[in-house]
Amino acid sequence: MEQAENGMRITIEGVRHIYKDDTVALDGIDLNIGTGLFGLLGPNGAGKSTLMRIITTLLPPTEGKVSVGGYDVVHNRREVRGLIGYLPQEFSAWRLHRVAEVLDTLAALSGLEEKSVRHKRVDEIIESVGLKDVADRKVKKLSGGMVRRLGVAQALVHEPKIMIVDEPTVGLDPEERINFRQLMTRLGQDRVILLSTHIVADLGSGCSDMALIDHGKVKFRGSPSELIKRAIGSVFEITIPRQDEARVTSDLEIVSREDRKNEVSIRAVSRDRNLPPGARPLENPNLEEAYVAFMVAQGKKLGASEKEVA
C-alpha cells in the first residue's frame, strides 16, 4: 500500500469496540490528530486504553477504521508499527539490564544492525531524555521518573514520527510529573504525540488540542482554552469557617482547598448549579477546574485521582 498524502496523522472514523462480555468500550469515536501534543482525557474506564490498543494494532476494532500515517491499523500492521513509538501504562521489564544495554538491544531489534550507527543513536536518545548520568545504571535501581524516561527512550529509539503514551505519570511524584510533562512538550514539537490520561495536569502547557472521552464517546473536542471558556461562571471560590465545611460542601465537587487558621478556602463546582452564599465565581478557571465543571455538568462524580493537579 502506498502511504496516503495526509502525512503523519492519526485518523479515527466511527470506531466501536465491544468485548466478548458485551461491554461497549468505544461507541462511535471520530478523531483526526496531527503534529503536536494531543491530550486524550477521561476518567478510568472511559475507553482510552482500548483506543490506544487499537491504534497500536494490538486490538482490531469491532467497527470503524483507524489509519496511522495513511496506513490501516488492521491491514497494514507492520507499516503502522514502524511509524509508532509506544509507551504503555506499565513499563517495568529489563530490571537486571543497564539503561544503555536495554536501548542497544531494542535498537538492534528495530533494524539498526550497524554497531556504530546504533551506538550513536542510543547515545543521542539517552541524552535527549535526560538519562545520560545513569546510562550504566541497572533498571532496578532507577527512580520511577527515570523508568518512565527509559520508557520514552525505548519508544523513540527507532525514530518514530508518532508516539502513543498511555497514563504516563501513574506512580510518579510531583517533581517527576513536571519533568515528564516538559519532556512531552519538547518531543511534541516535531512529531505526533497522543497522550492518554485520567489526570488533567498530565496534559501540561504544551497541549494545544484535546478530546474528552467518557463511556466510550467523545464528549468534548477542542483546545484546552475552549474547555476553560465553557467553565467560566461554573467554578467558584469560597472561604468559610472550618466548622461549617462539611455542611457547605456536601453538594459541591471540590477542586482544591487551603487551610487558613480557623477558616478554609475552597475552589469548587456546584453539583446542583446553585452557588452557596458568599461564593465568588472565578473569571479565570484553570484546566483542572474546567474539566471538573464539564464532568459535573455531565452528571459525573470524580475521584480524587482525576483531580490531581501536581
Image: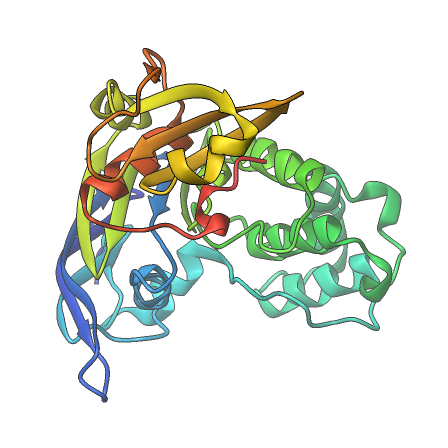
Eyeballing the image, is 194 above or below 139? above
In front of the other: 128 or 44: 44
In front of the other: 26 or 127: 26
Eyeballing the image, is 67 above or below 188? below
In front of the other: 105 or 245: 245
Q: Residue at x 84, y 73 (%)?
A: 96
Quadrant housing the N terminus? bottom left
Whether residue 32 is visible: yes
Q: State how the image is colored.
A: rainbow
> Residue 219's x, y, as percent?
18, 46
Q: Quadrant of residue 13?
A: bottom left
> Residue 123's x, y, as percent?
76, 45
Q: Which residue is farthest top?
A: 283
Q: Residue at x 27, y 66 (%)?
A: 73
Eyeballing the image, is 45 above or below 265? below
Quadrant housing the C terminus? top right
